[in-house]
Structure formats: structure tokens, C-alpha cells
Amino acid sequence: VAFEFIADHRVLDFLATLAERGTTDYEHLRAPADLAAWAAQSGVVDAPIDPSEAEFARAIALREALYRVLDAAIEGRAPRPADREFVNAAAGGRLPTRELTPGGDVRRSGDVQAVLAAVAVDALDLLGGPDRALLRHCADERCTRLFVDRSRGGRRRWCDMKGCGDRAKAAAYRRRRRAGEHAQTA
Ligand SMILES: [Zn+2]
């Protein structure tokens, strides 16, 4: 599976591994190996992780708690106590270590717990910083992805102009064309 990394925050890309929440609920993380692939592609750690079933279940539960916490922040609600505790516990874990290699590159390493800690800390950095006020839901009715709106004027509506934005423009074009055909036959 090739995962998408289009958001400015790792946590937002992690949340998007469950697509179209509330409609198709398309799950990209179906097995521990999918989580390992996400971790490798995200660059949170360089060496592959090998999640157990229990760690995988914890990752999915954390993802959903993070979604509810960020969703609550957008809506101006306080997080649920259970979600808050879960996120705080994950964020308090040991983060991936960074190490300068002899060649001058940086190597990041850590286990599943460290990957989840990195994602949870990213969520708290988002909520504790200026991007909190820019957090939005994609306007596409099925997408439900969260994004940070850095556009001038703060009027961006879609998570990604190539995906949801193009779909919306194509739909608007079809509507206009239909309206035009209707006007000609009338
Ligand atoms: Zn979208």
C-alpha cells in the first residue's frame, strides 16, 4: 500500500488512514504489516517496525482517540476524558531516537510505541500551536479529512486541490453544463 502524505502534520496523515469516516469508512490499516508500512513511508523511523496484534489494536484505538480530540478542538469542545488520558499516555512514551551517522545523515529509530508517541506528540504540538486555529474539515461530503488551512484569507475548503478540490470543480462543471443544455432545450 502506498500511503498519502499530503498534510503538514504527520498526525493528520495518520488519521487519514481511515478514509471517508462515517460513510464507507475505508480502512487502509487492515493488519499490523500495514502499520509497519505506514511507519516506514512516513519517515517517523527508518528501520522497519514489527507490530504485534495488541500493538496494532492500540495504534488503531489511538488513531480514533486522536481524531475525536482534534475534531473536538475544531468544534470548540473539550476532549473526552478517556481520549485525553489515552493521548497523554501515548505522548508520554519514549520518542524515536535521532542519531547522526558517520556519513552525516540522520537515522531515526524506535519501536511501535515510539512511533505512536511521535504521532501523539505531533497532535499535541498542533493543538498547542498556531495551527490549531487553522484546523478544518475537508468540505467534500465523504472525505472528512482534517487539514491545516494556510491559504491567505483562510478560505481553503478541501484537504487537497488535486483530489477533493478537482472532484468539486468537475462536479461544478457538470452542473453548469447540464444547466446550459437545459437552457438550450427550453
Ligand atoms: Zn478531502
Image (spheres, helix red, strand yellow):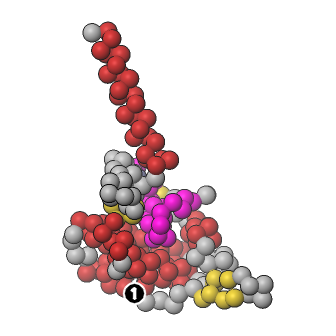
Question: Residue 89 placed where, x, y %?
Answer: 39, 87
In front here: 6 or 25?
Answer: 6
Which residue is rendered at x = 46% and y = 52% of the image? 160
Looking at the image, the residue that sits furthest to the left is 77
Which residue is rendered at x = 33% and y = 47% of the image? 141
Looking at the image, the residue that sits furthest to the top is 185
Q: In the image, is residue 96 above or below residue 171? A: below
In the picture, residue 16 is in which quadrant?
bottom left
Question: Residue 143 placed where, x, y %?
Answer: 39, 51
Is 76 one of the magenta-colored residues? no
Query: Which residue position holds label 1?
Result: 89
Question: Residue 107 placed where, x, y %?
Answer: 68, 83
Which residue is rendered at x = 39% and y = 51% of the image? 158
Is 13 one of the magenta-colored residues? yes
Looking at the image, the residue that sits furthest to the front is 152
Q: Main secondary structure of the magenta part?
A: loop
In front here: 116 or 178?
Answer: 178
Give the residue type at disc 1: Ala
Q: The magenta stretch spans which residues?
A: 3-26
Confirm whether residue 20 shows in the render.
Answer: no
